[in-house]
Image (tube, rainbow, N blue to C red):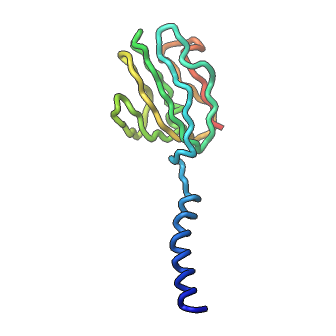
Amino acid sequence: MTRFALTAITLATALILPLAVAAQTAGLLSRENRVELPPLTLASGSAVAAAPLVLKSGTYYILQIESDGSAELALEGSGFFRAVWVNEIVINDIEIRPLGIDSLEFDDEGKAEISFIAIKPGSYELRVPGSSGDSQRVGITIE
């Protein structure tokens, strides 16, 4: 093989290899792995969610929680939050990267966005503390 041929092969490998590696290593946080969930609503007398959520372990999710300010309301779910890895919580364009979370409380109207990766399969819930009605909770299954 000539020196020119070896140089051409080396150059082609140097150009193609990074593209092949990048295509194979998209990662858990990549756009291709993201799913936006239907928003949850905190409002006096309204259901938190239209339907239970079914998630897939290893998928990256974005969840909006919206409060209309009609009452001081919270969502708690320590079991759920222990079954996921929370990437960040965004409130008023402030990004929070917590080590753990138990609940979110809204004293007024506003929105929070939680991005997370579902990890541990099982059945969980997020619910309004102190409530007993089915409409004040959302069932979450991680498969």
For the N terminus, give its image quadrant: bottom right
Looking at the image, the residue that sits furthest to the bottom is 2
Looking at the image, the residue that sits furthest to the right is 143
Question: Which x, y percent locates residue 33?
Answer: 57, 44
Question: Which x, y percent locates residue 107?
Answer: 36, 16
Q: Is residue 69 above or below residue 3?
A: above
Q: Who's the residue at 59% across and 45% down the image? A: 58
Looking at the image, the residue that sits furthest to the front is 4
Viewer-nearest residue: 4 or 104: 4
Question: Which x, y percent locates residue 12?
Answer: 55, 75
Q: Is residue 138 above or below residue 85?
A: above
- How many numbered dots are placed on residues in this image? 0
Question: Which x, y percent locates residue 126?
Answer: 53, 24
Q: Who's the residue at 39% across and 38% down the image? A: 98
Q: Who's the residue at 46% across and 33% down the image? A: 114
For the C terminus, give its image quadrant: top right
Q: Who's the residue at 51% across and 37% down the image? A: 82
Q: Quadrant of residue 123?
A: top right
Viewer-nearest residue: 86 or 90: 90
